[in-house]
Image: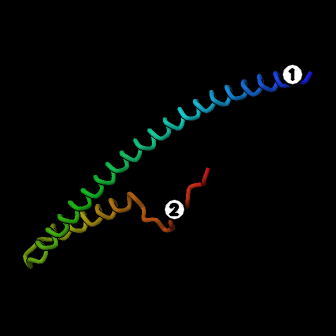
């Protein structure tokens, strides 16, 4: 009877080990997919961030040029209007990514 119990336990252990390994392979596959998606998202965010930085620099340069032109006493009202329009655009650009009011929460530890 003792041998039969040992044999059953061995078979049960083998079965559970195979089942666990199969699940582990599936889980690892899903994790790899998630990591690839996360790196793709990070790359896309970097591109968007770079584009926003470039646009911001261009707007600030145009504003500086127009403000220099406005220093001329004969500058038309259109220059002042253009400066205000660019300032509005640059503010809208800055508001695309809101400034954090609180530090980001730590992700939960799994």
Expressed as whole percent of the image width and height from the top left, the position of residue 100 reads 46, 65
Expressed as whole percent of the image width and height from the top left, the position of residue 55 reads 25, 56
The residue at which mark 1 appears reads as 3
- Single out the residue that lies furthest toward the right: 1
Q: Which residue is drawn at 19% across and 67% down?
A: 63
Spatial CA distance of label 2 from label 1 is 59 Å
Expressed as whole percent of the image width and height from the top left, the position of residue 81 reads 21, 67
Q: In which quarter of the image is residue 78?
A: bottom left
Nearer to us in this view, 30 or 42: 30
Lower sequence index among marks 2 and 1: 1
The correct choice, above or below, for 52 with respect to 42 in the image is below
Q: Is 105 displayed left or right of 45 in the figure?
A: right
Asked if marks 2 and 1 touch (Cβ < 8 Å), the reply is no
Neighbour class for label 2 at 10 Å: few (<14), some, many (≥20)? Answer: few
- Nearer the observer: mark 2 or 1; the answer is 1
Question: Residue 93 bears which disc, if any?
Answer: none
The residue at which mark 2 appears reads as 104
Q: Which residue is drawn at 19% across and 71% down?
A: 80
The correct choice, above or below, for 10 with respect to 38 in the image is above
């Amino acid at each position: 009877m003792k041998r039969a119990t040992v044999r059953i336990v061995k078979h049960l252990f083998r079965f559970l080990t195979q089942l666990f390994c199969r699940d582990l392979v599936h889980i690892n596959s899903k994790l790899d997919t998630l990591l690839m998606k996360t790196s793709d998202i990070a790359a896309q965010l970097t591109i968007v961030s770079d584009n926003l930085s470039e646009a911001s620099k261009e707007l600030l340069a145009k504003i500086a040029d127009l403000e220099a032109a406005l220093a001329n006493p004969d500058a038309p009202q259109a220059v002042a209007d253009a400066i205000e329009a660019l300032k509005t655009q640059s503010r809208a650009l800055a508001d695309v990514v809101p400034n954090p009011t609180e530090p980001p929460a730590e992700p939960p530890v799994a």
